[in-house]
Image (cartoon, rainbow, N blue to C red):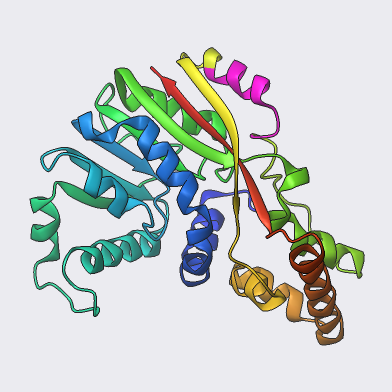
Amino acid sequence: MNIQFQDQLKTYWSNYVDNYSKIQGNQASIGITLINMLDVSNASRIFESGCGPGLTIPTILLDKQLNCEFVSTDLSEKMVESSKQRVLNFLTFPNGQQEQDSENLFKQISWRAEVANAEDLSQYSSDYFDIYYGGFIFHLVLNPIQALKEAYRILKPGGKIGFSVWGRREIADNYTLLRATATEIGYVFPKSHDSFQLGSDRAELKQLLESLGFQNILLWYQNTAANRFKAEQIIEGQNPGIIEFLQKDQDLYKQLLIRLDEKIQHKLTVLNEPLMQDCLLVIAQK
């Protein structure tokens, strides 16, 4: 998708809520690692950027102190509402029942979810948060440098940032297999943002973070297996706009499903490996 403006980005993610929720579990181990490295149990104020449907929010709620102020944010209102429902389900309502006063319940655990643009956090004070947590956010925003500047601004001196971005393209077939296969059989994709760029070079990202004022920087690659075993699982995890694009030519789409399944089965039964996704994880201090 060729996204150039904030309203396009917001629409993209708002339309993606349901399908993204199906695949977010593939990223769970990355989030848990970052949360552990950030030592959230000793924080007084935690900020989360790009919370999405809220997969890792319960992990932070379990680890943080009850009176620690925890703010989860996303550009999409639908993502924010989805994260609220996840927290409600996590707390006391596994059958989807609605709390009459959910906001009061959230206050009791010192948590709230709000719409916010990672590139403009002007509604939040400077030098305020102990922790900034951003799981898979900076490689997806329009201006990652501006978003990192805002993260630095709202952190207290000595505060920590922890974030993850896509890592090495060559060992991330969970991310690359669909587009590569579609291109092989004749699909022509519009020019789009390269989500691998930010995480492809550790030294370059370290230099960028240092130029913004961050110190005590740790960067490491970590890969995780993806719970995808057939073509339909890869398709159903895509944004609806991408699915619509792929299904316009039904003959080509049928070829795509066949070729995808062939490649997936080769990985599973010949190489005896799952599809993988590689990520670059970062911890740094203001």
Tell me which residue sits at (34%, 65%) in the image. 82
Tell me which residue sits at (31%, 50%) in the image. 59
Indicate whether 15 appears above or below 177. Answer: below
> What secondary structure prevails in the magenta region?
helix
Residue 2 in view here = no
Query: Where on the picture, by quarter, is residue 248?
Result: bottom right
Q: Please identify the quadrant where the C terminus is shown.
A: top left
Q: Please identify the quadrant where the N terminus is shown.
A: bottom right
User: Left or right: where does residue 40 sit relative to residue 214?
Assistant: left
Percent across and percent down for residue 285 are 40, 19
User: Left or right: where does residue 42 sit relative to residue 155?
Assistant: left
Q: Is 33 covered by the magenta stretch?
A: no
Indicate whether 217 appears above or below 11. Answer: above
Query: Where on the picture, by quarter, is residue 143?
Result: top right
127, 215: nearer the viewer: 215
Percent across and percent down for residue 7 are 51, 55
User: Left or right: where does residue 222 sit relative to residue 109?
Assistant: right
Q: How many marks?
A: 0
Q: Is 204 covered by the magenta stretch?
A: yes
Percent across and percent down for residue 155 are 32, 24
Residue 127 in view here = yes
207, 191: nearer the viewer: 207
Tell me which residue sits at (74%, 66%) in the image. 268
Indicate whether 108 appears above or below 256. Answer: above
Span highlighted in magenta in the image: 199-209
User: Left or right: where does residue 211 sit relative to residue 110?
Assistant: right
Tell me which residue sits at (86%, 80%) in the image. 255
Percent across and percent down for residue 104 are 8, 59
